[in-house]
Image (cartoon, grey):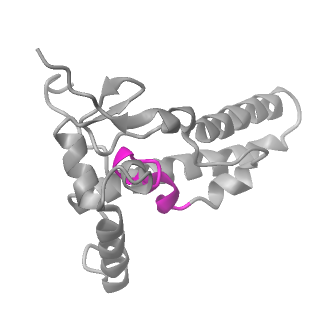
């Protein structure tokens, strides 16, 4: 089983760690989105990989006759609805659109990126610092994790936290 207090890693390291093209692309993403290290990028790549794998499996099962096809269609709609709730997919999307997603789509939904895009911080690094120091709230609740995935309907409720004097 394992120690319940110990966190499990939620990313997969690259197969070829020293591939020059991958390193350059990863470094550009780390700089552009203000990530602390590449593990944060790998975590979101793992999330994307999971949804793409599910979409590929469901695409193969949708055209099956009978009950299996109906179950696959229902699961496909649930996956698409969940990704629309995250704000990664648009309305009237299909499983082919899920396969067309990139890691940038998920990185754009991070709280750090949204704080910077809304103009609450001057730089992406300042946005991270504001979040970690507890100056940002989402829907009236303090959030101190820069990698918090902001849902589409909560995006308008991101703001600077007003400090109450005791």
Residue 117 locus on image (x, y percent): 43, 56
Residue 21 locus on image (x, y percent): 37, 83
How many numbered discs, if any? Answer: 0
Pick out the residue farthest to the right: 65
Query: Vertically, is 148 above or below 94?
Result: above
Closer to us: 164 or 38 = 164
Q: In which quarter of the image is residue 116?
A: bottom left
Query: Vertically, is 148 above or below 12?
Result: above
Query: Vertically, is 6 above or below 20?
Result: above
Closer to us: 76 or 3 = 76
Pick out the residue farthest to the bottom: 20
Q: Main SS type for the magenta part?
A: helix
Quadrant of the drawing holding the C terminus: top left
Residue at the image position 14 percent from the left and 19 percent from the top: 165
Query: Vertically, is 8 above or below 99?
Result: above
Give yes or no for residue 29 being in the magenta stretch: no
Quadrant of the drawing holding the N terminus: top left
Left or right relative to 91: residue 146 = left
Residue 38 shows in the view: yes
Residue at the image position 67 percent from the left and 35 percent from the top: 81
Pick out the residue farthest to the top: 166
Residue at the image position 48 percent from the left and 61 percent from the top: 104
Residue 78 locus on image (x, y percent): 67, 31
In magenta, the rendered stretch is 102-113
Residue 164 locus on image (x, y percent): 20, 20
Pick out the residue farthest to the left: 166
Residue at the image position 72 percent from the left and 56 percent from the top: 96
């Amino acid at each position: 089983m394992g120690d319940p207090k110990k966190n499990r890693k939620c990313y997969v390291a690259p197969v070829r760690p020293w591939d020059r093209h991958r390193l350059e692309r990863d470094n550009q993403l780390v700089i552009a989105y203000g990530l602390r290290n590449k593990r944060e990028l790998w975590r979101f790549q793992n999330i994307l990989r999971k949804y793409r794998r599910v979409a590929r499996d469901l695409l193969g099962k949708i055209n099956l006759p009978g009950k299996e096809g109906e179950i696959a269609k229902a699961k496909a709609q649930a996956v698409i609805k969940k990704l629309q709730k995250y704000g990664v997919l648009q309305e009237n999307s299909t499983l082919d659109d899920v396969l067309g997603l990139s890691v940038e789509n998920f990185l754009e939904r991070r709280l750090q990126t949204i704080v910077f895009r809304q103009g609450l911080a001057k730089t992406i690094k300042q946005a991270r610092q504001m979040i970690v120091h507890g100056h940002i709230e989402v829907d009236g609740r303090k959030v101190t994790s820069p990698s918090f995935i902001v849902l589409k309907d909560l995006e308008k409720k991101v703001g600077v936290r007003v400090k109450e004097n005791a």
